[in-house]
Amino acid sequence: MLIGSTIDSKKMKTFLPVGTCPIRDILSRLGDKWSLLVLVTLKANGTMRFSDIHKSIGDISQRMLTVTLRSLEADGLVNRKVYPEVPPRVEYSLTPSADELMLPLHSLVEWAMKNMQDIVSSRELYKNKG
Amino acid sequence: MLIGSTIDSKKMKTFLPVGTCPIRDILSRLGDKWSLLVLVTLKANGTMRFSDIHKSIGDISQRMLTVTLRSLEADGLVNRKVYPEVPPRVEYSLTPSADELMLPLHSLVEWAMKNMQDIVSSRELYKNKG
DNA sequence: AGCATTACTTACCTTTTTGTAACCTTATTA
DNA sequence: TAATAAGGTTACAAAAAGGTAAGTAATGCT
């Protein structure tokens, strides 16, 4: 007798691996420690200087802020405008595609706010008995 | 003369650090390599056995699938039902709160699909000239 | 007796990500 | 003359995440 899986593997939906699937690729890029937070910070405050973002987030290191901003810039999600002054001034702002991202992101945050209590208690429960 | 930031730091919006801010906490949890993919897989196929998920995703290791499912279970996002049989059978499915998560997630995926061309070309551009 | 089955666990190792601290630039100011 | 400003870079260290391969359990089949 054949003991099969619950799902016919012919009908089963599969997903492309990272590097082949643009969606996985993009989501994994946004899934790092700081990217979303930087985007949300810029959304909340508009155009900001490097040091403003740094102060606003608080616990990000200078290096990680640079790294994060660079990768967001590479992806076309933030604009970087350098003023040739001394001391230097650099302003960051969201691009239109990042602005569009804010809507999905906002609904994600709403979900998180709505469900965080359940999640926290679920974690407690899981820790205490499994 | 006072050279200030573009934004008054009193009015500037700030965000709580991880561990204090539930939203950052939850989003960072979902931002790992496999969680969202596992959720999307379960959404697409309904109830699945461990081996089904494994086959469907393809390039996830057994260990990481276990780890990921455990943390999703701890957060109350997947149900885990064990049938006391030999060989063992374990079925996974989404909980209602994970189901709700699918809507925001879906709009995120739509954004990714709409913007991925721009992102890819932006990356090329950035690589080639900066 | 020995192998297959499924859903893991464990020990160990590699890779990736993040953090720390020091250094750089150049005009202005004390 | 030396410090200060802003926005970095660099070398290095630490931590976190992920991968590999082997082992485990209990039963049925050959």
Image (cartoon, coloured by chain):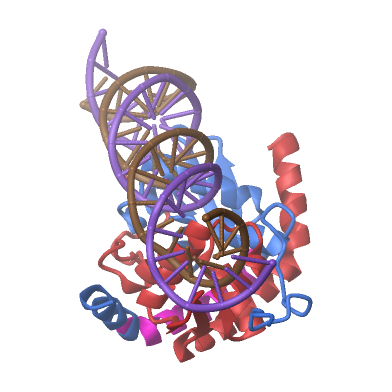
Chain colours: A red, B blue, C purple, D brown
Query: Does residue B79 appear to the left or right of A126 in the view shown?
Result: left
**Is B6 rendered above or below residue D7?**
below
Q: Is residue B47 visible?
A: no
Asked whether D13 or A27 is in front, the reply is D13
Q: Is residue B19 visible?
A: yes
What's drawn in magenta, residue-wise? B98-117
Residue B72, image x, y percentages: 58, 52
Residue at (35% x, 67% y) in the render: A25
Residue at (31% x, 81% y) in the render: B122
Q: Quadrant of the N terminus of chain B?
A: bottom right
Residue B63, image x, y percentages: 42, 39
**Is B51 rendered above or below residue B9?**
above
Residue A43, magenta (yes or no): no
Residue at (56% x, 41% y) in the render: B82
Residue at (34% x, 80% y) in the render: B119
Residue B96, image x, y percentages: 66, 66
